């Protein structure tokens, strides 16, 4: 069952097409990744979904409500965690959350419980009375997430929530997103970090130049890319004749030697590794390091667009 449908969405700023016919669907209860490089159109898409910007054409339907026709009902269902934290530094965390709760229509008699609940969710309950100005970057990000959750939305849209923060806060945020799933909150997670998207997301849309270039589960997406794994074997010295024996092994697609490293492109690293190992040792060399790189969304992006996801 779909919670969000985005059809043919377009938005231009002057002659720049920020979103250029984007279509995708988000299912109830999933963590949906929107992955794309800088300037792909992710934040603009989010602004169009929550009605902050008006589209030139296309439609957004949130749980049956058209954002253009029934904007107030659609907006009530959405919580936003903007790319830039929207917080008042001179107020305490609690006061910030009371503000956002009131703005987002939380009834006055439920506000204090809602504030305490979201502080618990993001792990800031013990720092709740401190001024936000004294918070670290990571804590501000976490409070920003609490603000997005204050009115119990069905859909939480997070715009690059872990950019530029310390690893501990980053892990905390990733684990928080995992727990949202158990609370029946659907999440759109926007990022240009492949590892985060692979770790968190049930389905992913990859965006580039304002267009969704592919959408699916991670295994579905990876099927479209180059399926080969890259096996790197570092040896103390390159044995004579190694090229011939490795190339003759089953499942070896490509073989090359770079410095003290043997690089094998293979469709089956598990099978190639032991036999390559045996051949190397038989030729009198010693193996010092082995690395297996599986295809990931980064290599898929490269296959689909011819460019790297990150500069
Ligand atoms: N208000 C605006 N006025 C003019 N151009 C804009 C505006 N907002 C975005 N753009 C342009 O639209 C394109 C998409 O921007 P957007 O912020 O949606 O990308 P993004 O995928 O969120 O990038 P990032 O990962 O850097 O946040 C960019 O070329 C950007 O410069
Ligand atoms: Mg952005």
Image (cartoon, rainbow, N blue to C red):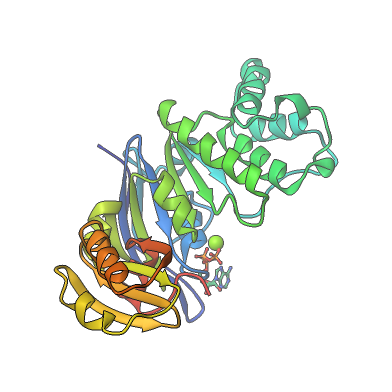
On screen, residue 256 versus residue 288, left or right, reads left
Percent x, y for residue 180?
47, 32
Residue shown at 60% from the left, 26% from the top: 106
User: With respect to residue 83, does 128 lie above or below?
Assistant: above
> Toward which corner of the image does residue 117 lie, by quadrant?
top right
> Toward which corner of the image does residue 272 lie, by quadrant?
bottom left
Taking the image as drawn, is residue 268 in sight?
yes
Question: Quick one: which residue is furthest to the top in this view?
Answer: 109
User: With respect to residue 282, does 162 lie above or below?
Assistant: above
User: With respect to residue 259, does 109 lie above or below?
Assistant: above
Percent x, y for residue 282?
27, 69
Give the number of marks: 0
Is 270 in front, or is 135?
270
> Toward which corner of the image does residue 241 lie, by quadrant?
bottom left
Q: Quadrant of ligand 1?
A: bottom right
Taking the image as drawn, is residue 217 in sight?
no
Residue shown at 46% from the left, 69% from the top: 40
Image quadrant holding the N terminus, namely: top left
User: With respect to residue 142, does 281 lie above or below?
Assistant: below
Residue shown at 40% from the left, 51% from the top: 198
Is 26 in front, or is 17?
26
Is 32 in front, or is 14?
32
On screen, residue 52 versus residue 36, left or right, reads right
Percent x, y for residue 68?
41, 51
Percent x, y for residue 201?
38, 46
Residue shown at 59% from the left, 38% from the top: 172
């Amino acid at each position: 069952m779909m919670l969000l449908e985005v059809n043919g969405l377009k938005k231009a700023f002057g002659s720049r097409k920020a979103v250029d016919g984007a279509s995708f669907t988000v299912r109830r209860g999933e963590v949906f990744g929107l992955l794309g490089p800088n300037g792909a159109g992710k934040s603009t898409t989010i602004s169009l979904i929550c009605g902050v910007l008006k589209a030139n054409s296309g439609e957004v339907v949130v749980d049956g409500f058209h954002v253009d026709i029934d904007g107030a009902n659609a907006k009530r269902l959405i919580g936003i965690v903007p790319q830039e934290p929207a917080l008042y530094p001179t107020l305490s965390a609690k006061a910030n959350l009371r503000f956002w709760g009131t703005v987002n229509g939380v009834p006055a008699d439920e506000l204090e419980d809602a504030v305490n609940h979201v502080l618990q969710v993001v792990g800031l309950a013990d720092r709740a009375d401190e001024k936000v100005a004294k918070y670290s970057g990571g804590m501000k990000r976490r409070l920003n997430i609490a603000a997005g959750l204050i009115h119990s939305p069905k859909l939480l849209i997070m715009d690059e929530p872990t950019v530029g923060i310390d690893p501990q806060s980053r892990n905390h945020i990733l684990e928080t997103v995992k727990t949202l799933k158990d609370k029946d909150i659907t999440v759109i997670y926007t990022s240009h970090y492949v590892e985060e998207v692979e770790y968190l997301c049930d389905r992913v849309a990859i965006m580039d130049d304002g267009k969704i270039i592919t959408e699916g589960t991670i295994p579905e997406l990876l099927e479209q890319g180059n399926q080969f794994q890259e096996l790197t074997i570092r040896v103390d010295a390159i044995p004579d004749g190694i090229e011939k024996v490795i190339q003759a092994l089953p499942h070896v697609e490509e073989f090359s030697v770079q410095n003290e490293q043997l690089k094998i492109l293979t469709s089956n690293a598990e099978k190639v590794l032991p036999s390559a190992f045996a051949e190397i040792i038989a030729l009198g060399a010693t193996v010092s390091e082995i690395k297996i790189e599986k295809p990931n969304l980064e290599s898929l992006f490269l296959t689909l667009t011819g460019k790297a996801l990150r500069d």
